[in-house]
């Protein structure tokens, strides 16, 4: 099992619009492709205009297949085109649980 942690720094004045657009147009589509959503978060301390979401996959191959299918979907491409002007920065980390992690 791996976790894909993705964080996006959003223009401060666009955060509400970004989240509303995601819920209305992107969330169901993304979940249909990626599957196991662990959580979606906004930051309260630190970079306050940041969203973070975490997805669980069986392994890197599972992640690559699911993300490739989503990226090839014209509906996802349209959503990304609509929301990309809101995004200032994107970061991504792959997390692997330790042998003693409660989430494995």
Image (cartoon, rainbow, N blue to C red):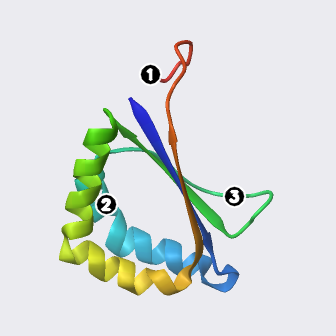
- Disc 3 and disc 2 in contact, CB within 8 angstroms: no
Q: What residue would you read off at disc 3?
A: 43
Q: Residue at x 49, y 30 (%)?
A: 96
Nearer the observer, 64 or 70: 64
Q: Residue at x 34, y 69 (%)?
A: 26
Q: Please say if 96 is above or below 7.
A: above
Mark before the other along the chain sequence, 3 or 1: 3
Q: Please say if 95 is above or below 92.
A: above
Label 3 and label 2: CA atoms lie apart by 21 Å
Question: The N terminus lies in which quarter of the figure?
Answer: top left
Q: Residue at x 44, y 22 (%)?
A: 104
Q: What residue would you read off at disc 2?
A: 30
Q: Find numbered disc 1 in the image and state the secondary structure of the residue it sits on.
A: loop
Q: Percent x, y for residue 3?
A: 45, 39
Q: What residue would you read off at disc 1?
A: 104
Q: Percent x, y for residue 78?
A: 29, 82
Q: Residues within 10 Å of mark 3 (few under 14, many from 20)?
A: few
The reply, left or right, for residue 40 in relation to residue 74 is right
Q: Find numbered disc 3 in the image and state the secondary structure of the residue it sits on.
A: loop
The reply, left or right, for residue 25 in relation to residue 53 is left
Nearer the observer, 9 or 12: 9
Q: Residues within 10 Å of mark 2 (few under 14, many from 20)?
A: some
Label 3 and label 1: CA atoms lie apart by 25 Å
- Disc 1 and disc 2 in contact, CB within 8 angstroms: no
Which is in the foreground here, disc 3 or disc 1?
A: 1
The reply, left or right, for residue 14 in relation to residue 20 is right
Q: Please say if 13 is above or below 37.
A: below
Mark before the other along the chain sequence, 3 or 2: 2
């Amino acid at each position: 099992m791996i976790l894909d942690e993705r964080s996006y720094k959003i223009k401060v004045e666009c955060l509400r619009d970004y989240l509303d657009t995601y819920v209305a147009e992107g969330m169901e589509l993304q979940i249909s492709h990626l599957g196991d959503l662990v959580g979606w978060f906004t930051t309260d301390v630190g970079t306050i205009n940041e969203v973070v979401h975490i997805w669980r996959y069986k392994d890197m191959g599972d992640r690559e297949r699911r993300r490739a299918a989503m990226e090839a979907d014209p509906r996802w491409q349209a959503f990304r085109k609509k929301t990309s002007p809101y995004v200032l920065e994107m970061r991504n980390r792959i997390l692997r649980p330790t042998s003693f992690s409660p989430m494995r």
